[in-house]
Image (spheres, helix red, strand yellow):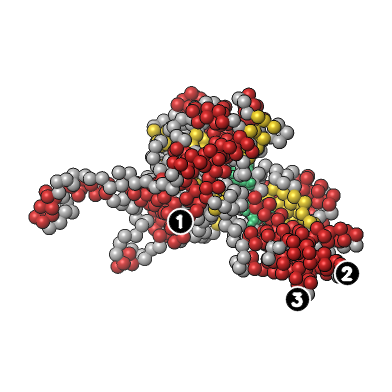
Amino acid sequence: MNILQEISVQLQQGNPKKVAEFTQQAINENIDTKTILDNGLIAGMAVIGEKFKAHEIFLPDVLLAAKAMYAGMDLLKPLLVKEGIPTIGKVVIGTVQGDLHDIGKNLVVIMLRGAGFEVFDLGNDVSPEKFLETAVKENAIVIGMSALLTTTMPVMKKVIDLAKERHLYGKKKFIVGGAPLSADYAAEIGASAYCFDGMSAVETVKRFTTTSS
Amino acid sequence: MRPTLQFLSDQLIEQIIAEGREIMCKLGIEIHNDLALLLMHNNGAKVDKTASRVYFTQSLIDNALAAVPHAFKLYDVYGNEAVDLSGFNVNFTPGSAAINILDSTTNKFRKPTTQDYVRYAKLMCKMNNIASQSTAMIPSDVHEKISDSYRLYLSLLYCDKPVVTGAFTIEAFEIMKNLQITIRSSKENLKAKPLTIFSCCPTSPLKWSEVTSQNLLDCAAYSIPVEYIAMPLSGFMSPVTLVGTLIQHTAETLSGLVMSQLMNPGTPVLYGGSPAFFDVRYETTPMGSVATMMIDCAYNEIGKYLGIPTQAYIGLSDAKALDAQAGFETSLGAALAALAGINNISGPGMRDFESCFSLEKLVVDNEICGTALRLIRGIEPKEDFPSLPIFEELLREKHLLIADHTRKYFKEEDYIPGTVISRANRSRWEEEGSTTVGQRAMIEIEKHIKAWQPTNLPDNVKKELTVLMENESRKYGMTKLPNID
Ligand code: B12
């Protein structure tokens, strides 16, 4: 097994110490930073994602792997920044104004971070302005919104309408989720996608960030 | 003898309560509400205002427990007694606040409308095993800011049973309270004869949001009963063990109790909840999990131990269709809850993790509730001793079909379900159309709705309710409420 495979395997087993160790070793061996990221850490998380989807492993296994991934990321991050390599994508996310349900949103945040995305979590009860301002400031392409109440769902449309007003609509991708949402409703309000769980969120964000870069 | 079910020994209950209280005092509870913080502070709790954290004291908890009523009743719109929340009495109420309805004609999930709600309320009048109505779904054809009060309005117009409900915002309480005062004609009468129960949820872990804590305080001010709905999610937002989850549930529920009783000592409350054993495969909160049901029954034992009437979201299903899963999860929950003596059992009609209501399921669940209610009446002798006379009669007449003893007791000894449950032999079932339970439920629904008669609430009161609701809707730019009939 080469060192990158080692990283991937240790990550899948949820072993942060080993992941950090092998990542450091790979850095010392002068392996290209982007290669360590793509073929080590992200490759490992991709396997985890597939297994989760196939019901072979459960959520705690995914979260453990994500934690192991962070251990490697912590070492790579300064190098990525120094070498000017962009992260695989930035996401601004929050639960919309008037809504306090944040469990599902939090799970999505964990899964996205685990997949290597840089996530700006605005918490719950987030105003339309805050979503857009943060996305502009952080130069994030994807804006994720969560709503669990039929009464707060319309706030998502407000965010999108405000984006249109501010000429941001074509430049950002809006993904939405939560129990009262549906693909139909997402289409109706002009959102880019509806996601029914954390894993589908990861896939969708991947799609949007690779097509836009 | 009434059969009962017990999961916890007194010793374990005491241990769980002691731990819950210690959490409240040592770790504190986050409460995002200035009035609540002030009340706590004035009554001796240590309050960290910047962190919105309250460190309770044992005496604060003791005083609340001393003040809380051990029982209360609900009264229908006319003021007649309808629901007795005391001891081991069991009352069913439909699951509440569904996001979707399952459309009977298309068999698809969709957002409910006023028409759906009115059909539901009319049907509820005929659900003889379900003692109260709940504001079961959210009509989507009115402004979202009135969708919580509007469903209460429709319920009060179309069905006379008391209502289990709740507000989605702080502002909505005002109109929801005024609708009730209109029916009772004064604040005092409403206090004397409660018409509704409001669900108020702490946010696990160990936190109260501003909206839900304010709803709780506002209810207390008017002596409107509240049910605390803590939702610890085992293995995710609470410890994975059932005991660990119960400790957390105790701390979250008792913190609500202290707030209510400080605001207005003696205000009626239910020791309730909607915990779930989190499903780590699907990222969901299953109501049909046996562990979820066991947590419900167990915290009900803790509530009873503390002398507080109880509530739970149990007797509902995560199934998406009216299938075997729906029947099995609902029946198991309803039977366990009834045996455990949960006073207000919220569930009938609900599927898909408390998010989809179905009238067909309500009709089937009404039979499940009837079955559970029969179950807990247990087995009692009824003119069975001495037994020789009835056996002499049997031998003499060759059967007992028309015996006095039979005619006197056959309706109470078994629960006789409606036609939605098939007990015909196969040939007759085939002759009658080989119907599924869903098809029979649809027939039953139409029959009941057709037979519905307007309630006897005086016309001028109905009119007043409508004026209140119209004024409220105008605030949000709706000049007209949806057409009903
Ligand atoms: C737990 C819960 C609560 C907790 C929330 C705790 C918290 N910190 O979030 C508490 C107890 C606080 C709560 C409060 C209330 N709740 Co609540 N709650 C629930 C419950 C049971 C489960 C939600 C949950 O956490 N699920 C588990 C997570 C993992 O799943 P999820 O949220 O669906 O998220 C997943 C996907 O949807 C998706 N996703 C979600 N968001 C996003 C975002 C993006 C960008 C993406 C890509 C994907 C995505 O991915 C997630 C991971 O898989 C639901 C029932 C249900 N069926 O959803 C009711 C429910 C949503 N609540 C309801 C109600 C009514 C309330 C209250 C108004 C009750 C009251 N009167 O006090 C208050 C709300 C106050 C407010 N203003 O917000 C109703 C809503 C009814 C309606 N028609 O709108 C429901 C349906 C229950 C019911 N029938 O009564 N609730």
> Residue type at mark 2?
Asn
For mark 3, name the chain: A
Task: Find numbered disc 1 in the image and state the secondary structure of the residue it sits on.
Answer: helix
In this figure, which residue is indicated by the disc labeled 3? A1
For mark 2, name the chain: A
Establish if B25 lies above or below B144. above
For mark 1, name the chain: B
Frontmost of labels 1 and 3 is 3
Establish if A140 lies above or below B37. below
In this figure, which residue is indicated by the disc labeled 2? A30
* Circle 2/circle 1 CB separation < 8 Å: no
Q: Residue furthest left?
A: B396
Q: Would you call the spot at circle 3 few (<14 residues within 10 Å), some (14-19), or many (20 or more)? A: few
Q: CA distance from mark 2 to mark 1?
A: 58 Å
Frontmost of labels 2 and 1 is 2
* Sequence-first tag of 2 and 3: 3
Same chain for mark 2 and mark 3? The answer is: yes
